[in-house]
Image (spheres, coloured by chain):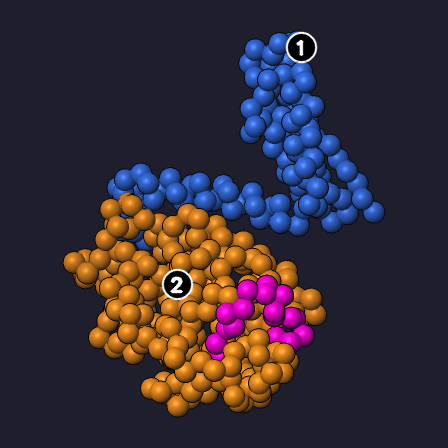
Chain colours: A orange, B blue
Amino acid sequence: MARIIVVTSGKGGVGKTTTAAAMAMGLALRGYRTSVVDFDVGLRNLDLIMGCERRVVYDFVNVINKEANLRQALIRDKRCDNLYILPASQTRDKEALSKEGVGEVLEELSQDFDYVICDSPAGIEKGAYLAMYYADDAVVVSNPEVSSVRDADRMIGILASKSRRSELNEEPIKEHLLLTRYSPKRVEKGEMLSVDDVLDILALPLLGVIPESQAVLTASNEGLPVVLDEKSDAGQAYRDAVSRYLGEELPHRFIYNEKKGLFGRLFGG
Amino acid sequence: MGLLDYFRTTRPKSAHVAKERLQILVAHERRMRGAPSYLAEMQRELLDVIRKYANVRDDAISIQMEQDEDREILEVNIVLPDEVTNKGYDETGGKIDTTRN
């Protein structure tokens, strides 16, 4: 049985799809059979970030409606054999995803994979609700910015009260915080919430801090999950996050301004 | 932590302001999470009633809901302006207990 991981945030544009793509590729590179599912019906974008947009034939909604089977719809990643993508539909029908349909597809994926990553749409509407409903783990993505942190807190409340696990009184979804677009320089100047500030407010275990990085835009330009860019800070930060997800204890990097290397070491960064 | 604190105290305003605003807002929203959905409408209606007697601002009312083991406490705080036209009150706050079984 697979672990089902939802990548969610509430707010849009904070890096959910980048994170879902990076986590999926990261887990697959570590040897786990991984699939990543785009729940953003009508605004499909995971395919673009994964670089498989021209290979989409069938989608998630086709599978739910039994117009195609899962094998036909899953796209195998060209760079990593362990990784498969299930693209979202571009239909404008908001009711295209049903709770039962999503449950059946995730169940079937669970038979074949070690990890199923659900890339949630922004907001708290049906797509976001269904993306988190069946999850075992959640990666809550937030920027160090007020509206993003507020929405993340809202989403944490929803994860705790509206999921299948909460309805069945099972062990709650295991939540992790991923802080993205972090700029140590601006934090030092007092212009940006620090990691500690955000942790004080959200009180979740920290999966990782992804620095603001040009590599993220370059990666999405090229349809290359940023973890594949091993030299980039963001790529390394995502690799660390994947390792932490798998239970390894790693010090957090990219939290302190580079020039303060000595302080960074003093803080046990 | 000592060194970290040093950075905290010396850093300028905006991040600090952001944190304070968030802490207040998030604490409030968490308290209201389990609250019944009619509270917002009730707040608007109460505001309308109060406005028959006093000219108050939109944020003059705050409603909090707290839960004990066997009862819920609905706390309604109304801040009246300094110069109240009809009545002589300066400020008032009240607590209404709603006990549910």
Which of the 4 quarters of the picture holds residue B22?
top left
Residue A232 forms part of the magenta stretch: no
Q: At 34% from the left edge and 72% from the top edge, which residue is drawn?
A: A238
CB atoms of marks 1 and 2 within 8 Å: no
In the visual, does A12 lie left or right of B75? left
Q: At 25% from the left edge and 77% from the top edge, which residue is drawn?
A: A230
Which of the 4 quarters of the picture holds residue A162?
bottom right
* Amino acid at circle 2: Gly
Q: Which span is picked out in magenta?
A: A86-102
Give the labeled residue for mark 2.
A15
- By secondary structure, the bulk of the magenta-drawn segment is best described as loop
Q: Can I make out residue A116 in this image?
A: no
In the visual, does A205 lie left or right of A251? right
Q: Can I make out residue B97 in this image?
A: yes
Per the image, label 2 sits on a secondary structure element best described as loop
Residue B87, numbered circle: 1
| Vertical order, B66 against A203 (above or below) | above
Q: At 48% from the left edge and 76% from the top edge, which residue is drawn?
A: A87
Return the residue nearer the eye: B11 or A210: A210
